């Protein structure tokens, strides 16, 4: 695996491969890699000639300074995992490479038709503006490719798909299923920040979602919200930030009586760590 820190160099190298007819797969990450990321890399490897993984902890998508400060950084281990997963290029820019004019730079607005107004967008002001800003820069640095994203960040995936469509970017988005720990907890870089006693109760989040899926057929949106709130509050370390049943396409909240194309999304605070998860209800 070769490590590249400059955008222009990366694009030049990848364009050389493209001129030989090779196709490029891209996995954008913020590092602290886990089996979920490696599944994306392996999927990319199976569908492309060249795989690029980026590691960049993007400051503009953190609405909470403390979260940015404590975001896990495990570069040595990440490099080892990527080498084993036969990643070809690690793109490892620093902040000045991605934001040469400073992180306050303004981006041209994009109409996301409300995708960014709910759930993560409502609870983390500015988060999706930061995600769009960096993902656009990363896509530009990699060029035409298939880009792989995990479904754990369900809303992020919808926002990025919309961005690609609006700006007609030469990128095909590939969504990959959530990878879970044996007890059901969705894999996340943030899980490493959980204290042992918090880790024990963290699986209540996914177990609650699985229960919600089971009950969905016979319960309304309001009934399910009440049940989920009760299940989460039965663990006193968990604080429910939101639980929404949303339309899979528009992400707008569903009403009682609506049943089709629903996804249940949850955000929970556990100690100092904020965790999200989701499950498609059907
Ligand atoms: O999902 C992530 O890890 C990040 O939001 C992403 C897409 C790499 C942008 O910084």
Image (cartoon, rainbow, N blue to C red):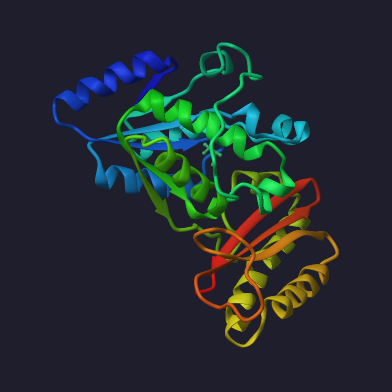
Residue 109, placed above or below residue 265: above
Instruction: Say whether residue 37 is left or right of residue 118.
Output: left
Residue 68 position by quadrant: top right
The image shows residue 21 at horizontal and vertical percentages of 14, 31
Return the residue found at the far right. 236
Q: Nearer the viewer, residue 116 or 44?
A: 116
Residue 63 position by quadrant: top right
Q: Nearer the viewer, residue 62 or 235?
A: 62
Residue visible at 60% across and 80% down in the picture: 216
Q: Nearer the viewer, residue 42 or 58?
A: 58
The image shows residue 174 at horizontal and vertical percentages of 37, 49
Return the residue found at the far left. 20
Residue 17, placed above or below residue 269: above
Which quadrant: the N terminus?
top left
The image shows residue 36 at horizontal and vertical percentages of 48, 50
Q: Is residue 31 visible?
A: no
Residue 129, placed above or below residue 173: above
Q: Nearer the viewer, residue 126 or 85?
A: 126
Residue visible at 74% across and 63% down in the picture: 201
Image quadrant, ligand 1: top right
Return the residue found at the far bottom. 218
Residue 108 position by quadrant: top right
Residue visible at 59% across and 62% down in the picture: 278
């Amino acid at each position: 695996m070769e490590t590249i820190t400059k955008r222009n160099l990366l694009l030049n190298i990848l364009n050389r491969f493209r001129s030989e007819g090779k196709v490029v797969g891209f996995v954008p990450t913020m590092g602290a890699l886990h089996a979920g990321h490696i599944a994306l890399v392996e999927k990319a490897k199976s569908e492309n000639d060249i795989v690029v993984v980026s590691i960049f902890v993007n400051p503009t998508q953190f609405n909470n300074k403390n979260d940015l400060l404590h975001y896990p950084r495990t570069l040595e281990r990440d490099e080892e995992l990527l080498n084993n997963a036969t990643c070809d290029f690690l793109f490892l820019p620093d902040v000045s490479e991605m934001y040469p004019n400073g992180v306050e730079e303004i981006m041209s607005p994009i109409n996301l038709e409300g995708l960014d107004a709910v759930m993560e967008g409502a609870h983390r002001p500015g988060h999706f503006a930061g995600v769009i800003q960096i993902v656009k820069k990363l896509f530009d640095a990699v060029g035409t490719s298939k880009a792989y994203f995990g479904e754990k960040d369900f809303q992020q995936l919808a926002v990025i798909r919309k961005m690609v469509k609006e700006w007609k970017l030469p990128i095909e988005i590939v969504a990959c299923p959530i990878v879970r720990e044996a007890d059901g907890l969705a894999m996340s870089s943030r899980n490493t920040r959980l204290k042992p006693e918090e880790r024990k109760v963290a699986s209540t989040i996914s177990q609650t979602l699985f229960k919600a899926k089971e009950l969905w057929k016979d319960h309304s949106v309001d009934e399910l919200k009440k049940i989920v709130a009760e299940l989460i509050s039965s663990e006193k370390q968990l604080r429910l930030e939101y639980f929404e049943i949303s339309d899979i396409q528009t992400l707008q909240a569903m009403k009682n009586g609506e049943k089709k194309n629903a996804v249940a999304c949850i955000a929970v605070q556990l100690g100092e760590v904020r965790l999200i998860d989701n499950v498609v209800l059907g």
